[in-house]
Image: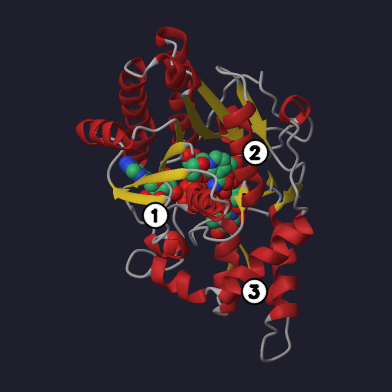
C-alpha cells in the first residue's frame, strides 16, 4: 500500500482528504500539522485510531524535524497542503503567510529532494510531490474570461502573493533538481470542517446566533465554488495520473455572486432550522465595508483535468450546499470546539491590526 505524507491534514481540505484516504483504505497516511488556530484534531476524531493513520504535530519550517519524519515514514508521495489560508488574516498580518507559505514550502521541497535523491531506482521513479495551490495566484477577472493553466500570474493579496511564490519554488525544484512535482490550482472550496472564518460557515453561524450576516461591499464579487470532496478526488487523480511537472486547474464550473450564496444559505436555514418568530434569516444580511483589494471574480476553465485525466465534480451546488448546511447544523459542537478561545466571528481583514 502507498504511503502518503500529507501536510496540513488537520485543516479544512486536509482533514477531508485524510477522511477519504483512510475511509477508503487507499493509503497509509502520515499527517504532519502544526495545529495552528486553523488545524484541529477535532476534525479527525473518526480516524485517529485507524491503523493506517499517523499524526505528528510539527512545523513544516522545521528542517531537522521534517528530515526525521521523511526518514522514519519513507513516503511514496507528498501532498503539501499546509499553509496560512485566509485572505483577511493575510491583510492584517502578512508575516505568517510569507514564513509558512514560502519558507515552509521551500523546506518541504529541500527535504523532499534530499530524500528522493536517496531512493532506490524504482521508488525514485514513482515518487511524487503534489503542491496544492489556489486560483488566486492568477489575480482577478472582470466579467468575461476564465483562468487557464497558461494564464499569467498576477496575485494581489499577501496570501495569494505568498502562494504564487510557493508555486514558483515548486517549479524551480523540478526544473533545477528534477524533483517530480505536480501543481494544482483550485477555486473556492466549501463543505464540512471549514474553519468558521470563511464566508460559508461565517454566514451559517452568525445567522444561527441572530447576528448580522456580514457581506463585504455590495456582495457582487464572484467565486467559483467546489464541494471539498470533489477537490479531494481531483487531487488524487492528479497524483496518480498527472504528468510530472504539469499544472492542473480544478474548479466546479459554478460561479456565484456572494449575495446569491448568502441568500441560498438563508433559504436552507429557513427550511432546516426556522427562526422562532417565523422571519427569514435573510433579514440579517448586512452590507459592510469592503475587503481592501477585494478580487472581483474568479472562474476556472477545468477543461485540461477533464480531458486529460477524466475528472469531473460529482456534486452540484444544490446538493453540496444542502450537505454543507446540514453538516454545520449537526456539528455545532465542532464549531464551538474549534472557535473556542481563538476567534469569535468578529470582523477581521481591514488592515488596521499589527
Ligand atoms: P486551512 O487553513 O483550513 O488549513 C491549513 C492547515 O495547515 C491547518 O491544519 C494548519 O494547522 C496547518 N498549518 C499551518 N501552518 C503550518 C505549519 N507551519 N506547519 C504545519 N502545519 C501548518 O486551509 P485549507 O482551506 O484546508 O487549505 C489547504 C490548502 O489548500 C492551502 O495550501 C490553500 O492555499 C489551498 N487551497 C485552499 C482553497 C480553499 O478554498 N480553502 C482553495 C484552493 C487551494
Ligand atoms: O479561490 C480559492 C481561495 O478561496 C483559497 O485559496 C483561500 O484559501 C480561501 O480562503 C478562499 O478565499 P476567498 O477570499 O475567496 O474566501 P472567503 O471565504 O474568505 O471569502 C469568499 C468571498 O466572500 C469573498 O469575496 C469575500 C466575501 N466575504 C467573506 C467573508 C469571510 C464576505 O462577504 N463576508 C465575510 O464575512
Residue depth check, mark 3 versus mark 2: number of the one nearer the observer = 2
Left or right: 226 as drawn, with respect to 178: right
- Image quadrant of ligand 1? top left
Question: Is the residue marked 1 within 8 Å of ligand 1, measured from its CB?
Answer: yes
Q: Measure the C-alpha gap from mark 3 to mark 1.
A: 30 Å
Residue depth check, mark 2 versus mark 1: number of the one nearer the observer = 2
Q: Earlier in the sequence, mark 2 or mark 1?
A: 1
Q: Residues within 10 Å of mark 1 (few under 14, many from 20)?
A: many
Q: Which of marks 3 and 2 is nearer the N terminus?
A: 2
- Residue depicted at 67% across the width and 86% down the height: 275
Question: Is the residue marked 3 within 8 Å of ligand 2, measured from its CB?
Answer: no
Q: How many labels does the image show?
A: 3
Based on the displayed image, in which of its 4 quarters is residue 95 positioned? top left
- Dot 3 corresponds to which residue? 284
Left or right: 348 as drawn, with respect to 208: left
Numbered circle sitting on residue 234: 2
Left or right: 46 as drawn, with respect to 190: left
- Dot 1 corresponds to which residue? 39
Amino acid at each position: 500500500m502507498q504511503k502518503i505524507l500529507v501536510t496540513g491534514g488537520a485543516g479544512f481540505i486536509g482533514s477531508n482528504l485524510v477522511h477519504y484516504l483512510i475511509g477508503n483504505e487507499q493509503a497509509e497516511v502520515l499527517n504532519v500539522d502544526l495545529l495552528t488556530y486553523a488545524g484541529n484534531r477535532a476534525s479527525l476524531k473518526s480516524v485517529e485510531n485507524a491503523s493506517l493513520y499517523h499524526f505528528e504535530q510539527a512545523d513544516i519550517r522545521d528542517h531537522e524535524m521534517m528530515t526525521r519524519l521523511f526518514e522514519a515514514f519513507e513516503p511514496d508521495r507528498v501532498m503539501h497542503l499546509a499553509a496560512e489560508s485566509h485572505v483577511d488574516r493575510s491583510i492584517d498580518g502578512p508575516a505568517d503567510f510569507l514564513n509558512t507559505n514560502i519558507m515552509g514550502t521551500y523546506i518541504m521541497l529541500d527535504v523532499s529532494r534530499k530524500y528522493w535523491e536517496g531512493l532506490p531506482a524504482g521508488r525514485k521513479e514513482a515518487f511524487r510531490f503534489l503542491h496544492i495551490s489556489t486560483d488566486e495566484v492568477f489575480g482577478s477577472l472582470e466579467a468575461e474570461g476564465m483562468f487557464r493553466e497558461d494564464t499569467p500570474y498576477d496575485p494581489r493579496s499577501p496570501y495569494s502573493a505568498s502562494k504564487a511564490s510557493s508555486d514558483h519554488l515548486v517549479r524551480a525544484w523540478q526544473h533545477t533538481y528534477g524533483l517530480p512535482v505536480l501543481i494544482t490550482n483550485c477555486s473556492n472550496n466549501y463543505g464540512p470542517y471549514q474553519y468558521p472564518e470563511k464566508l460559508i460557515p461565517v454566514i451559517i453561524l452568525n445567522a444561527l446566533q441572530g447576528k448580522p450576516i456580514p457581506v463585504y461591499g455590495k456582495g457582487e464579487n464572484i467565486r467559483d465554488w467546489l464541494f471539498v470532496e470533489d477537490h479531494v478526488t481531483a487531487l488524487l487523480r492528479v497524483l496518480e495520473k498527472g504528468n510530472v511537472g504539469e499544472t492542473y486547474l480544478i474548479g466546479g464550473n459554478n460561479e456565484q455572486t456572494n449575495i446569491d450564496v448568502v441568500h441560498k444559505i438563508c433559504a436552507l436555514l429557513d427550511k432546516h432550522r426556522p427562526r422562532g418568530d417565523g422571519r427569514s434569516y435573510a433579514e440579517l444580511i448586512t452590507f459592510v465595508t469592503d475587503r481592501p483589494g477585494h478580487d472581483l471574480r474568479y472562474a476556472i476553465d477545468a477543461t485540461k483535468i477533464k480531458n486529460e485525466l477524466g475528472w469531473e465534480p460529482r456534486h452540484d451546488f444544490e446538493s453540496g450546499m444542502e450537505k454543507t448546511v446540514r453538516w454545520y447544523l449537526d456539528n455545532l459542537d465542532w464549531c464551538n470546539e474549534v472557535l473556542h478561545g481563538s476567534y469569535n466571528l468578529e470582523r477581521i481583514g481591514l488592515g488596521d491590526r499589527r
